[in-house]
Image (tube, helix red, strand yellow):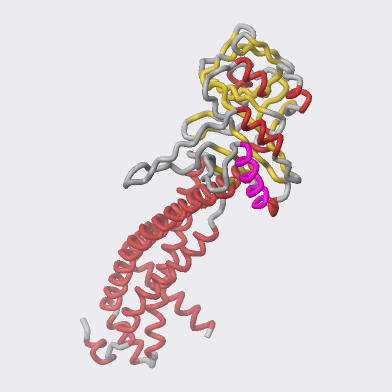
Amino acid sequence: MLGLFKENVKIALGSIRTQLLRTILTVLIIAIGITALVGILTVVSALENTLSKDFASMGSNTFSINQYENSTRRNGGGEREIVNPIISYPEAKAFKDNFDYPLAHTSVSFTATTTAEVKFETDKTDPEASVVGVDDYFMPNSGLEVVKGRNFTAFDIDNNSYVCVLGSDFEKKLLKDLNPIDKIISIRGAKFKVIGVLKEKGSTFGNSQDLRVMIPIQVARSLFTAPNINYTTSVMVDKKELLSNAVDNAVIAMRKVRKLSPVEDANFAISRSDDLINKILDITQYLSLSAWVIGIITIFGSSIALMNIMLVSVTERTREIGVRKALGAKKSTIAMQFFMETLVIGQLGGMFGIVFGILIGYIISVLIKFDFVIPWLAITAAFVVSFIVAVVSGSYPAIKAAKLDPIEALRYE
């Protein structure tokens, strides 16, 4: 059986060499479909991997109390628009003081400005830096990592120390790659000692996450005064299995802070970190579906092309089939010969498509700064699809060749 298989493969490769140009075109048609499928699935896998890593750094055991949910509220079709009040500092502080859940750490923060000018000696930045008032739990709750120096301590926050932690861009643009620790910078005339530098985060929707200055929250409140400042309250629970109970307790605590009666709707929102990533990953499923649709449409065309080339091959080799049958070849042997040729062409197209698809996916992932991963699911899918294409496309020509009458085949010119 193995010897017959090797012989069929040898005959298939010989036939392919005699029709090299036609075979190359057919392989390319199959490869294009597989490339589209593997390429898009590779990019989607890289996107999912990047999102998973980013949110994993924040932790899947965090949640925040916001004015509204992450989703946009519509005010059409008779739906009543709900206007929630901002979360003021007294409310955020009261929540932090009253929310006493085991193994939970609460942080209160606010964005003081997004148009700050930061000075160091005679140099200064453009007025595009963000200043964030934070406490000592802000960094771990937000998934931020200090790569140089240290984080804020409770002593820094309680004593309103004029210290700061910088985003990574300041080290390059303002400090000119000097050691930033213990350097003095100036914001609105106030001088701050640099105690730490954050790990580079990149940009989100065009906004740099590395052009931020974190300062103690009370210092920020004294320097930046504005009406209706909306504060952010985030909570991190040490054990993920306690998260749901912690969220329930947070809702109760915030309702008490806002003095809501049991029949009143909550006028605030709880956003869990794992809910957000699940919503984003749901969107990527549509991208995967699009890849399959594009790939199947292209592969359907390549299946027709592959079937046509095999039918032409059967017609051109009618006399060869007649000779083989006259010498005693069985129908199954003739069918297997042509089926094997189709299988070889299909797998060649699949392999080239996988290589091109992964290469294109890698290039796109590098350009848009996604974390590339080898898409094993896409590779497996490509092999399966190319095999199915070969089976479907090769069955009819193989059966047609097997059914040829040997006498009529020998007469064929």
Q: Could you say which quadrant of the image residue 271 lies in?
A: top right
Q: Is 174 rendered above or below residue 409?
A: above
Q: Is 257 rendered above or below residue 247?
A: above
Determine the residue positioned at 68% across, 21% down: 164
| Observer-nearest of 88 and 153 | 88
Measuring from the top left, give residue 153's x and y in whole percent: 76, 27
Measuring from the top left, give residue 17's x and y in whole percent: 38, 67
In the image, is residue 253 part of the stretch drawn in magenta? Answer: yes
Determine the residue positioned at 49% across, 36% down: 84
| Observer-nearest of 31 and 61 | 61
Q: Is residue 190 left or right of residue 312?
A: right
| Observer-nearest of 153 and 312 | 153
Q: Of helix, strand and loop, which mostly describes the magenta segment? A: helix
Determine the residue positioned at 65% across, 13% down: 185
Measuring from the top left, give residue 32's x and y in whole percent: 37, 57
| Segment colored magenta | 243-257
Measuring from the top left, give residue 223's x and y in whole percent: 61, 15
In the image, is residue 121 part of the stretch drawn in magenta? Answer: no
| Observer-nearest of 36 and 209 | 209
